[in-house]
């Protein structure tokens, strides 16, 4: 016993289209005198309103604390005389960080005619010879970047001893014994 849904029948004739007429264009009228456009803006007070007085409360607001100056930017650490200068490179990169240039320049001024030993490391795991083989070029690039920075700071090429190791991270420069 299913009930059939009755569908409305379609009209026999289609509806007539809406009449189309020209629309007269009229300019917008100017605002009436005394309207919102001519109302002057209220004056802006020099200070906020006083805090409301509440029974039993002595002061409802506190004065804002004086602004605090931001801390000075960090100064590149200069290692103590004769201390090794570690260089932290980004993972897989041999671009010398700007902070390392400052520390290497300080090491160059401490040299007093002594040689400087430079080492670069290539991030390879200790027990994998294939990874070590792939990491050694990165180690040499890092050592070269450190050596070039020292030369730019006035250390002659003959005063540098450059080595590379596939195992380890970053690089280091130190005064030779």
Image (tube, helix red, strand yellow):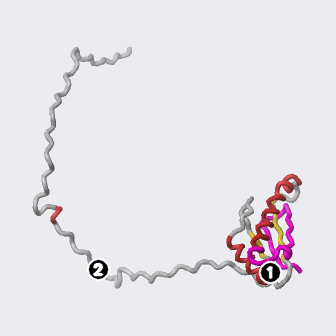
The mark found on residue 122 in the picture is none
Tell me which segment is drawn in magenta.
151-177
Residue 135 in the image, given as x and y percentages of width and height: 82, 57
Residue 36 in the image, given as x and y percentages of width and height: 17, 62
Q: Secondary structure at mark 2?
A: loop
Q: Is residue 166 located in the magenta-colored stretch of the structure? A: yes
Relative to 107, does residue 92 appear above or below in the rendering?
Answer: above
Left or right: 99 in relation to 163: left
The mark found on residue 46 in the picture is 2
* Rendered residue at 73%/65% (across/down): 89
Residue 155 in the image, given as x and y percentages of width and height: 79, 77
* Rendered residue at 83%/71% (across/down): 118
Viewer-nearest of discs 1 and 2: 1
Nearest the eye: 33 or 68: 33
Quadrant for the N terminus, please. Answer: top left
* Rendered residue at 51%/81% (across/down): 69
Structural crowding at the residue carrying mark 1, measured as other residues with C-alpha within 10 Å and reported as few (<14), some (14–19) or many (≥20): few
Q: Secondary structure at mark 1?
A: loop
Q: Are marks 1 and 2 in contact (CB under 8 Å)?
A: no
Q: Residue at label 1?
A: 83
Left or right: 42 in relation to 97: left
The alpha-carbon separation of the residues under discs 1 and 2 comes to: 60 Å
Quadrant for residue 104, please give it: bottom right
């Amino acid at each position: 016993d299913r009930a059939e849904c009755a569908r409305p029948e379609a009209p026999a004739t289609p509806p007539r289209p809406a009449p189309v007429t020209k629309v007269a264009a009229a300019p917008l009228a100017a605002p009436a005198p005394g309207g919102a456009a001519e109302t002057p803006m209220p004056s802006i007070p020099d200070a906020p309103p006083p805090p409301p007085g509440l029974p039993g409360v002595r002061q409802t607001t506190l004065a804002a604390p004086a602004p605090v100056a931001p801390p000075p930017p960090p100064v590149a650490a200069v290692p103590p005389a004769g201390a090794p200068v570690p260089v932290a490179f980004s993972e897989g990169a041999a671009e010398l960080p700007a902070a390392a240039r400052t520390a290497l320049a300080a090491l160059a001024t401490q040299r007093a005619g002594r040689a400087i030993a430079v080492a670069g490391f290539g991030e390879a795991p200790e027990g994998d010879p294939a990874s070590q083989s792939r990491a050694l070029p990165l180690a040499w690039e890092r050592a070269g970047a450190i050596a070039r920075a020292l030369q730019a700071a006035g250390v002659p090429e003959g005063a540098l001893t450059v080595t590379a190791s596939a195992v380890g991270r970053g690089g280091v420069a130190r005064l030779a014994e």
